[in-house]
Image (cartoon, rainbow, N blue to C red):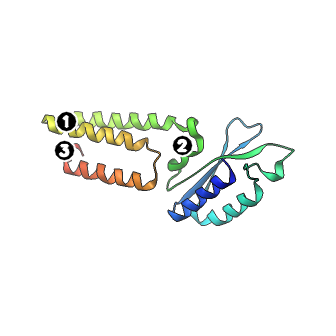
Amino acid sequence: MNKSELKAIFINAKATDAKYIGVSIQTEGSSQPEIIINPNPNFDAKFDYYMEAYDDDLILIAAKGKKDIRITAAGQGNRFEDIECQLLGERGKGWKELIAGAIDNAYEKMIATTPPTTEEEQTHCEMIKRQSRECSSMRAGRQQRQSSSRHTLSTMRKYSMCA
């Protein structure tokens, strides 16, 4: 990540009215990065700070020669979870398995309580389960998540035996 990429994230976050911008800062001697989450009202001040305090490679200028401190990732979103994977990359993928497991458990309980009575109902329930899992692991933008959620919700309402 470089300063131009960080600038683009801030511009996009402001344009889409994101609630948060997060940065991952790796400090020499630390085993894990520091995660900083900035709320929308602080975007301008934080942008100015990052542009002044970090060089083009996002290394903290004041720490040069003493300690390597650098911004390694940045992300934006409307919930902390929206930017978690953007900031942690491969280390943040564990949440996908947790969500998929929770969806599977909820689905199994739902089917045990109110089993589908026809093959078509079973197919629709399986489709909703699959869509829910796919939606939970998407890293796409807010519009894609909202569109998919609306579709899943309307499908669930249409086939209310799965609600």
Q: Picture coordinates of residue 50 (x, y %)?
A: 71, 57
Mark 1 lies on residue: 122
Q: Check whether the beta carbons of the residues at disc 2 and disc 3 lie within 8 A of each other.
A: no
The residue that appears at 72% across and 50% down in the rendered structure is 58
Question: Residue 122, how many percent across, how many down?
Answer: 19, 35
Earlier sequence position, callout 2 versus callout 3: 2
Classify mark 1: helix, strand or loop. helix
Residue 1 placement (x, y as % from top left): 66, 47
Left or right? Give the position of 35 relative to 151: right
Q: Is residue 85 left or right of residue 103?
A: right
Q: Callout 2, which amino acid?
A: Cys
Going by the numbered disc 3, the residue's amino acid type is: Met
10 Å crowding of disc 1: few (<14), some (14-19), many (20+): some
Q: Nearer the viewer, mark 2 or mark 3?
A: 2
Of the two numbered discs 1 and 3 on the same chain, state the one appearing first in sequence: 1
> Are the residues tagged 2 and 1 within 8 Å (C-beta)?
no
Circle 2 SS class: helix
- How much space separates mark 2 and mark 1, taking CA atoms? 33 Å
Residue 85, disc: 2
Q: Could you tell which of marks 2 and 1 lies nearer the N-terminus? A: 2
Q: Nearer the viewer, residue 157 or 111?
A: 157
Residue sitting at x 29%, y 51%:
151
Look at the picture and state if 10 lies above or below 75.
Answer: below
Q: Is residue 147 left or right of residue 142?
A: left
Residue 21 versus residue 138 in the image, above or below: below
Give the residue number, with chain letter if any, for mark 3: 161
Between the C-alphas of marks 2 and 3, the distance is 34 Å
Q: CA distance from mark 1 to mark 3?
A: 10 Å
**Residue 114 drawn at (x, y percent):** 19, 38
